[in-house]
Image (cartoon, helix red, strand yellow):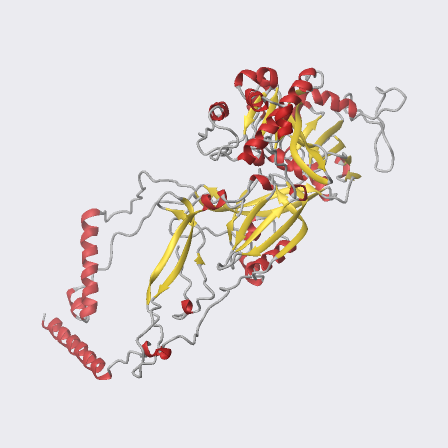
Amino acid sequence: MRTALMCSRVFLLTLALPLLAVSHFRSSPQGLGLVVTGTLPVFNLTASAPDEAGSPSKSRQNQLILGVMGIDIALEDIQKLMPRYSLGANGYMFAIDLNGYVLLHPNLKPQVINFQEPVTLDFLDAELEDENKEEIRRRMIDGLEGHQYIRTLVKSLDERYIDETERTYTYAPIHSTNYSLGLVLPLYSSYYLRANLSDQILQVQYPNKKTKDFESLMPNTFESEGRVFLAPRQYCQDLEQSENNTEFLLNFISLMEKVTPDSKQCDSFLLHNLILDTGITRDLADRVWKDKDLLTYGLLAVFAATDGGITRVFPNKAADDWMEDMEPHNSTFYRRSLDNKGYIFRAPYRDPGYRPSDLENNTVGILVSTAVDLEIDGRKLKPAVVGVKLDLEAWVEKFKILASNHSEGNPQGPRKQCSPSSSCEMDCDINSEDLLCVLIDDGGFLVMSNQQDHWAQVGKFFSEVDPNLMSALYNSSFFTRKESYDYQSLCAPKTESNKGAAPRGIFVPTIADMLNLAWLSSAAAWSLLQHLFVSLMYTSWMQAEDIMAENMEHREASCIMKQTQYYFNSLNATYSAVIDCGPCSRYFHAQRLSNTNLLFVVAETMICSQCDSMKLDQAEMRSEGPEQCELVEMPRYRKGPHVCFDYNTMEDTSDCGRGSMFRPSWLLLAFLQLLLLLGGCTSSSVGRGL
């Protein structure tokens, strides 16, 4: 949709304030993808002839519009101009217009694009809304500059977790447009590493460093140094991209044999950081990982992912089950590790419809990751994330021992009845039939359990496993619920009946009825007769048949999905209570584990099913969106164009036409009415004669 911002004929007469109208982006039929259209009206600004006295000072410019000029700019081309990788994994830029709609935003991912309609998404819908962001949005619409530090909620890439973190918002208007540009950075992204491998000291210390590091990217080194996943970035213009990691590595190495990192066709910033990270991760594998017996520690793999785009997984066979994105900036574990302190545990996600029969033969791996904190000259950085993948079966045995609490007496003695006001011994191993011990992550998903029948449910939302206990944890304020709407989802069309039926018989006017009508009514009657003839030839008088369309295309359409996430409430670190339900009451104790995103819960097993609580929903579901009445009562702030000219001293109004209103002729209307009356009388006479 192209729009030209023309407030009046004198719009371009104020040449000191040029203004470009930029529409919302849309999809281009020419194959450019999403494009932004900039338009500008073109007026005839040539001076008119001097007046009769020959004085040129009274000459005026006419304001005849010659047309509208415009240009389509691919959104991809705009994104290439942004310093994406120097902003870090959680830093980004965005732009909004006077309506608060985003032009650029990392969460702007329309699934269905209509060529005729623009793509619109409000800034407060692209992010989780709060009062601080409402203020930022208002100030940006007003064209103000600013810099704000806020604490806000951030949704994870997989849209299952929420983190409370710090962000700085810096914004300023884009001159000569109706847009405002914003920059969002976490505190640890205020500085970034820029490797300079052309430094003479490094060249003396590592004369063949480039060649040696690139050799560690070769597939024949994976067995000894771990498999390398290379982020699919545009390191050089001639680099051929590939979705296959091995093929992309070979393409990269082949190109590096022909060009140098300082070549004009290559991005030296990306290449130098890549070479640096390749060498560091290779040394990590050689000096640390190789000397460790991973099976002794119950580990399936160790890994390191860097800001430079390298992910190294050791040993090589463990990389076969590596399901994370090759681009660290697009991985949930990488982003969440940067935003959180300590160790982040994450089990493979299982949707509510998952059944144990779908479990594969290999063991389940629990991903544990943490960010690498680096300080250089007082500047704090997080250039990488390291972690391990735990063998669930091996670590459940360790978990049972670590979670048990024995006195100095007989550890296998009878278990003392627990109560909220007294301490009690617990054994998550021997008393597993009576005692439930679980680890739940900060999103409410099951990570580990002492119940063997829960192993196949690891990764499920805990309310799917034990609704009664999860409801108690939520009611005890361990978890806070956040609901939001995704306006960019894709849904299957709603099931609707495609059958249609109608009576085949219709009222047929008689000849006398038709002759009694005026000329216009006669035309309508003739159309009705045509419909009657078609009904006689192609349909049945006896019954209405159901007709089903053939080869119907059930295309997915854009829809609204309601998302629900749970996250830790910072108030409670430990809590004990009884889930009161008469003879089915249960005692439970919950404890936050420091330096992790885990909640340790011990509870008595369910002895009856009479206390089943309402199950909490976490999976997204189709929705009609927020209440329309609430939106009307609390409309979001919007604003018209910054400038709109309705007068200028240079305007020549002599060429302007005078407005007039069409005045009907009463004599003509009376004459036409008389003709209609005469025609009606004549028709009636003919009808009686027949």
| Quarter assignment of residue 420 | top right
On screen, residue 119 above or below 418: below
**x and y percent of residue 531 in the render?**
21, 55
Quadrant of the frame with the N terminus: bottom left
Looking at the image, can residue 383 be seen? yes
Which residue occupies the foreground of this view, 493 or 141? 141
| Quarter assignment of residue 599 | top right
Q: Left or right: 316 with respect to 668? A: right
Q: Left or right: 285 with respect to 77? A: right
How many numbered markers are drawn?
Answer: 0
On screen, residue 625 above or below 555: below
Q: Left or right: 269 with respect to 407? A: left
Residue at image coords 60%, 20% = 226
Looking at the image, can residue 159 be seen? no
Q: Residue furthest left?
A: 689
**x and y percent of residue 227 in the render?**
57, 21
On screen, residue 352 above or below 669: above
Q: Left or right: 686 with respect to 315? A: left
Which residue occupies the foreground of this view, 82 or 400? 82
Which residue occupies the foreground of this view, 94 or 588? 94
**x and y percent of residue 205 in the render?**
65, 24
Residue at image coords 41%, 65% = 6
Residue at image coords 21%, 59% = 528
Quadrant of the frame with the C terminus: bottom left
**x and y percent of residue 647 in the render?**
44, 74
Q: Residue furthest right?
A: 408
